[in-house]
Image (tube, helix red, strand yellow):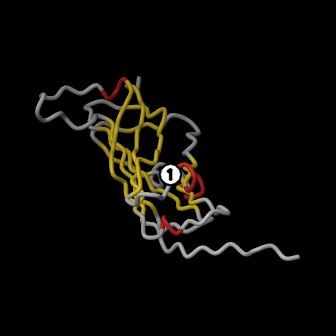
Amino acid sequence: MSTPRRLHRCAAVLVIGAACTTIGAAAAAAGSAHHPAPPALGVAGRPAGLLAPGRAVPIELALTNRRRFAVRVTRVVVSIGRTSVRGCGLRSNFRVRQLRLRRPIGLRPRSTRTLAQLGYGRVLWPRLVMLDTAANQDACADARVHLVYSAAGRRAR
């Protein structure tokens, strides 16, 4: 008796970095009620490829310190905000493997550094994973996955 083969006609899934959120002591920034100031500690990402069932895509992150003083980044989190296709469930189809910081990352005043520039090899970057499930994943074909980035840090001493 043979087991039925799982068919996945799921084409590529495009990953989009949609938002940048900042938390932590270094992020307290003043802004007007109409136009808030950009976060003091910014995170942006760019996935390195398209997703398919069973595939993990590394996400190259760039960390930006907009302050006039050095900052130590203590935490970076990548979350899945939403998908562009109704019926393509986030929890049932996608996971994020987070970046594990070896130590706090030092950022000079008013600078931007990528993970590669900071000495983090591609194998250590966070990854977006599309799970290869037994369920039909056709609803996720051509979906766009919007990612949300956040970081925490403090003033370096």
The one nearer the camera, 85 or 55, is 85
Q: Residue at x 48, y 65 (%)?
A: 139
Quadrant, the N terminus? bottom right
Residue 109 at what x, y percent from top left? Answer: 30, 36
In-image side of 8 versus 114 (left or right) = right
Amino acid type, label 1? Leu
Q: Residue at x 55, y 45 (%)?
A: 98
Q: Residue at x 33, y 47 (%)?
A: 19
Residue 94 at what x, y percent from top left? Answer: 55, 54
- Quarter holding residue 27: top left
Quadrant, the C terminus? top left
Residue 63 at what x, y percent from top left? Answer: 38, 45
- Quarter holding residue 26: top left
Residue 130 at what x, y percent from top left? Answer: 56, 60
Q: Is residue 34 above or below residue 46?
A: above
**Counting other residues with Cα less than 10 Å from the Cα at mark 1, is it few (<14), some (14-19), or many (20 or more)?**
some
The one nearer the camera, 87 or 98, is 87
Q: Residue at x 52, y 69 (%)?
A: 138
For label 1, the residue is 90
In-image side of 4 versus 66 (left or right) = right
